[in-house]
Image: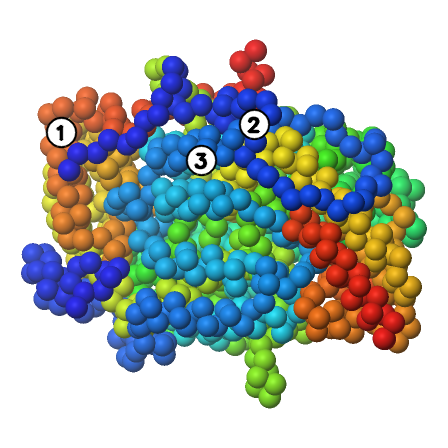
């Protein structure tokens, strides 16, 4: 299959900016008449200038349709972006979230008029709690990192309630960048522990790093190498022994659904990425949802309100009476529109479907690993004796050393095959890392096509490295000057015009 | 039978296992210690068909009464507006919807350019030069602004109005925990509701990182002395942060015109549904100042050219501020944001244009002023409780003894009207008061109906 992305181009630019398309007095909008009354806003508060673009509706539609055509999504093709779980997003979930009965309700409506929304949240909370093996789940956080931040606030509240100030959070060197940043944002000092030669947390180093100052250990399991932390029970024991909490980064939950649960492994706090594991679309960077699950002893610290059910009155309600709650981390109750999609997804899959998700996703990753690990140019660092979970991290170090083709060049070349780049240069403990997560929604044929592309690239690296270094050429635009973009940042139309002058 | 989202059938999976020399799927999970392997099935509903899921979810959600069916006057941080059909349809374009963060610029020009356009239009609206590509919501944007001001100034005190949204205040408190910021509430003038300038001046010392105001305020009135607040703030070497409802900026002066350094706000009304409180869209914009740019949180999209300098293109910039590179020294931990809501906002604003937004803002203000007139004329009601000018939200106090705001709202609801949000819990000093909002959705006859029924309710007690 050949690939060529759409390219709407003009002299020296792609599709013009919406400002460049503007013509005075055009409009794409109509309004009903206003009430017969003038507001008493004094003139000195009224603006005299506003320069938004002016376009008719068909122009707006064409402009953004063209832009969308110069964008690649899961619906376009294979998207093996490691740690991001870019699986197919069922269309029915979009339809349900767009229903007026979901999208046109206000969070401050009388509870009697939003019983359906409250029921959905109540049930989703219980499904997620069952999946992760925790006592309660808070649906408020907007994204994984937001959930991490809440997790850190809960950690602090927990230790404070026991009369202790603990100021250190331990994070493995292979962890997602958000873990470090979330812990720091909540005021903790970050202590990094190394991985061992098996690509897992070095238990001895961990024990040495822990003390009475340890508030928590943040861990991803399966970890970012796609490997299961098989010493998790010892890790949990060690953390709990010094009085710390164990935090589960849920980015990789797709690797264990129905197989094991964070709660059973000894985790105290768990975040979910509904926009990964539970198939709500990423939307080019969001919105997501990052609910937080906790064990019994942390329940009382969760944000308000929680959704409860009054059995006597057969009525759902929002409970604000939580005296030890940390308060709020976002206005209202979470990204409800995203919650609807995740709820529908869980119903579509059921318990056996979710388990099948993990089995198929894991098989797909292992299939890729076995087919590529012996290809000249690639290798797998760390443990290759056992299986990987839902993702695999290849190293292109040999290819870079021998032929000067690095992981980034490989990733860019894949774009020309109509395949999205894997995550590269992450985790940082693997040189020339290519982190590949196929997910369960790809066919064997697609995996084979990817494997063939990777092999062809490995061959080209030897014979025509120039072809690789010129990539991508099948995308709407070629390689951009990213250094210049950051050195002289032009971040708005206003700055752009100033620069042009 | 296969599964609709898992294309590799059991037979194909067997074949794949064969090819890679693994005996069974279970072998792929042999690394999970026996003790923690899940022995039983998860207690979840059994898998059902798409048709059944549709029916079940529709049935459950039918217990909700959307504001398209009942007449609602709720605002308070999220405001109901008409979303043109083409805006809804364009944001559902699956190339936008199903893409990840545009790390690969070459294959993501569409999303990058749409976000650049969003940033640009937010700058036009707010009078700022730089906007990020979104925060989670207004409240978290306030939190991030406080953190940013503390980093920029090296100071720890944050001054906020006592009458700010208490939800946002709670979020701000949580964001302030890390660096132990000291949040101080500034009182208000009893008659106007506006920030007490003399109290502000007293508190404005060399330890203040920023002064935050909301304009229009949470309770709907406008700050008529914003420029004086800005001047006092800058004189103390602090930064001035303004929170906005962006629709109001079709009509009201841009915060940049009265001295704002950072503008935050809730972008939901720009083409995004309310959806029971989320997804929302946090606006975050600032002046073009190297000190500020270096400390801004979140994603930024910038213009550049191809390496051969022949073609303009867009890419994420200044990523060294962000968590995936800077880790614990990042300006924020934010990663996934509200990008698609920002795209909706861009399409919405491009459709309205300057004139459309001006007319919309005027309509909202006129409708609110009509509602104020009608409700304020009713014996036993007072609207608004402040003397200041208002944009599209206002306070309504029930002065009829024996009839509290709760009972008043309950009686409205019986007649199919969702009244305002009671602010009795947040601000008990204002008595039996609610916060109401009017937008272009409210026709004259809707407001008349509210007034007629309100009058009846007050008389009947």
Q: Which residue is mark 3?
A: A61
Q: Which mark is residue A460?
A: 1
Determine whether B148 is above or below A258 in the image. above
Q: Quadrant of residue A347?
A: bottom left
Q: Do the residues at pointers 1 and 2 share their chain?
A: yes
Disc 2: host chain: A
Position of residue A127 in the picture relative to residue A357 (left or right): right
Q: Nearer the viewer, mark 3 or mark 1?
A: 3
Q: Which mark is residue A26?
A: 2
Task: Report if the CB atoms under discs 3 and 1 are less than 8 Å apart.
Answer: no
Question: Could you tell me if residue A209 is visible in this image?
Answer: no
**Tag 2's secondary structure?**
loop
Specify few, some or many for label 3: CA neighbours under 10 Å numbering under 14, 14-19, or 20 or more.
some
Please provide percent x and percent y for residue B432.
84, 66
Q: Residue at x 59, y 31 (%)?
A: B353
Please provide percent x and percent y for residue B249.
69, 37
Classify the position of the C terminus of chain A by image quarter.
Answer: top right
Question: Could you tell me if residue A394 is visible in this image?
Answer: yes
Please provide percent x and percent y for residue A308.
57, 76
Q: Which mark is residue A431?
A: none
Specify few, some or many for label 1: CA neighbours under 10 Å numbering under 14, 14-19, or 20 or more.
some
Classify the position of the N terminus of chain A by image quarter.
Answer: top left
């Amino acid at each position: 299959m050949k690939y060529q992305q759409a390219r709407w181009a003009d002299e020296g630019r792609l599709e013009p900016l919406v400002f460049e398309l503007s013509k005075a007095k055009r409009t794409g909008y109509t309004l009903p008449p206003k009430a017969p009354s003038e507001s008493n806003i004094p003139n000195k508060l009224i603006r005299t200038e506003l320069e938004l673009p002016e376009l008719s509706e068909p122009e707006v539609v064409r402009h953004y349709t063209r832009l969308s055509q110069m964008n690649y999504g899961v619906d376009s093709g294979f998207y093996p972006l490691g740690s991001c779980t870019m699986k197919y997003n069922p269309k029915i979930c979009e339809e349900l979230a767009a229903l007026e009965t979901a999208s046109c309700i206000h969070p401050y409506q009388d509870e009697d008029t939003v019983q359906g929304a409250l029921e959905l949240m109540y049930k989703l909370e219980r499904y997620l709690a069952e999946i992760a093996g925790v006592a309660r789940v808070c649906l408020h956080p907007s994204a994984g990192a937001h959930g991490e931040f809440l997790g850190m606030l809960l950690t602090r509240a927990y230790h404070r309630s026991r009369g202790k100030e603990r100021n250190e959070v331990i994070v493995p060197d292979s962890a997602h960048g958000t873990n470090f940043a979330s812990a720091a944002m909540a005021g903790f000092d970050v202590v990094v522990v190394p991985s061992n030669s098996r690509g897992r947390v070095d238990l001895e180093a961990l024990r040495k790093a822990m003390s009475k100052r340890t508030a928590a250990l943040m861990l991803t399991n399966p970890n970012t190498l796609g490997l299961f932390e098989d010493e998790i029970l010892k890790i949990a024991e060690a953390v709990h022994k010094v009085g710390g909490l164990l935090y589960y980064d849920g980015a990789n939950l797709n690797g264990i659904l129905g197989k094991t649960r964070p709660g059973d492994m000894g985790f105290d706090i768990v975040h979910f990425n509904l926009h990964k594991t539970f198939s709500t679309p990423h939307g080019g960077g969001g919105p997501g949802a990052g609910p937080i699950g906790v064990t019994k002893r942390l329940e009382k610290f969760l944000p308000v309100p929680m959704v409860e059910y009054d059995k006597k009155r057969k009525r759902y309600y929002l409970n604000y009476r939580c005296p030890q709650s940390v308060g709020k981390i976002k206005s209202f109750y979470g990204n409800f529109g995203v919650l609807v999609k995740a709820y529908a997804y869980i119903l579509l899959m059921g318990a056996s479907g979710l388990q099948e998700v993990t089995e198929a996703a894991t098989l797909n990753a292992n299939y890729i690993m076995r087919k590529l690990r012996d290809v000249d140019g690639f290798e797998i660092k760390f443990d290759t004796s056992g299986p990987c979970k839902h993702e695999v991290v290849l190293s292109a170090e040999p290819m870079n050393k021998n032929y000067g083709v690095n992981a980034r060049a490989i990733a860019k070349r894949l774009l020309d095959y109509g395949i999205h780049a894997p995550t590269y240069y992450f985790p940082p403990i693997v040189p020339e890392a290519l982190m590949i997560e196929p997910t369960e929604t790809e066919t064997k044929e697609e995996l084979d096509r990817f494997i063939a592309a990777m092999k062809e690239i490995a061959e080209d690296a030897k014979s025509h490295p120039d072809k690789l270094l010129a990539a991508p050429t099948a995308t709407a635009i070629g390689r951009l000057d990213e250094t210049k973009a950051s050195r002289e940042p032009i971040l708005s139309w206003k700055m752009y015009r100033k620069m042009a002058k | 039978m296969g599964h609709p989202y898992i294309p590799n059938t059991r037979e194909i999976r067997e074949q794949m296992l064969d090819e890679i020399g693994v005996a069974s799927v279970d072998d792929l999970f042999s690394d999970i210690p026996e003790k923690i392997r899940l022995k039983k099935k998860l207690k979840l509903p059994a898998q059902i068909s798409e048709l059944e899921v549709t029916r079940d979810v529709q049935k459950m959600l039918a217990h909700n009464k959307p504001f398209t069916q009942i007449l609602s006057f709720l605002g308070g941080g999220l405001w109901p507006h008409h979303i043109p059909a083409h805006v809804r349809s364009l944001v559902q374009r699956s190339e936008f919807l199903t893409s990840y963060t545009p790390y690969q610029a070459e294959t993501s020009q569409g999303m990058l350019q749409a976000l650049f356009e969003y940033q640009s239009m937010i700058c036009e609206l707010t009078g700022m030069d730089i906007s990020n590509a979104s925060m989670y919501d207004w409240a978290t944007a306030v939190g991030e602004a406080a953190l940013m001001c503390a980093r920029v100034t090296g100071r720890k005190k944050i001054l906020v109005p006592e009458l700010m949204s208490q939800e946002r205040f709670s979020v701000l408190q949580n964001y302030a925990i890390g660096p132990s910021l000291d949040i101080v509430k500034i009182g208000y003038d009893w008659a106007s509701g506006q920030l007490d300038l003399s109290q502000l001046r007293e508190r404005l010392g060399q330890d203040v990182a920023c002064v935050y105001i909301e304009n229009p305020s949470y309770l709907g009135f406008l700050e008529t002395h914003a420029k004086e607040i800005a001047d006092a703030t800058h004189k103390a070497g602090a930064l001035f942060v303004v929170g906005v409802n962006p629709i109001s900026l079709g009509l009201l002066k841009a915060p940049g015109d009265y001295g704002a350094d950072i503008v935050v706000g809730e972008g939901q009304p720009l083409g995004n549904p309310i959806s029971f409180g989320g997804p929302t869209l946090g606006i975050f914009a600032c002046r073009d100042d190297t000190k500020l740019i270096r400390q801004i949180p979140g994603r930024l999209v910038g213009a550049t050219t191809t390496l051969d300098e022949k073609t303009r293109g867009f890419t994420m910039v200044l990523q060294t501020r962000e968590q995936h590179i800077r880790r614990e020294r990042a300006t924020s931990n934010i990663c996934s944001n509200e990008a698609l809501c920002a795209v909706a906002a861009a399409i919405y604003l491009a459709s309205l244009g300057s004139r459309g937004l001006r007319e919309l803002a005027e309509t909202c203000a006129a409708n609110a002023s009509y509602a104020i007139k009608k409700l304020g004329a009713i014996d036993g009601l007072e609207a608004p409780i402040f003397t200041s000018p208002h944009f599209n939200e206002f306070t309504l106090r029930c002065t009829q003894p024996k009839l509290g705001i709760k009972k008043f709202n309950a009686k409205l609801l019986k007649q199919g009207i969702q009244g305002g949000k009671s602010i009795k819990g947040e601000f008990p000093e204002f008595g039996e008061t609610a916060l109401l909002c009017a937008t272009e959705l409210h026709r004259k006859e809707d407001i008349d109906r509210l007034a007629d029924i309100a009058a009846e309710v007050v008389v009947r007690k």
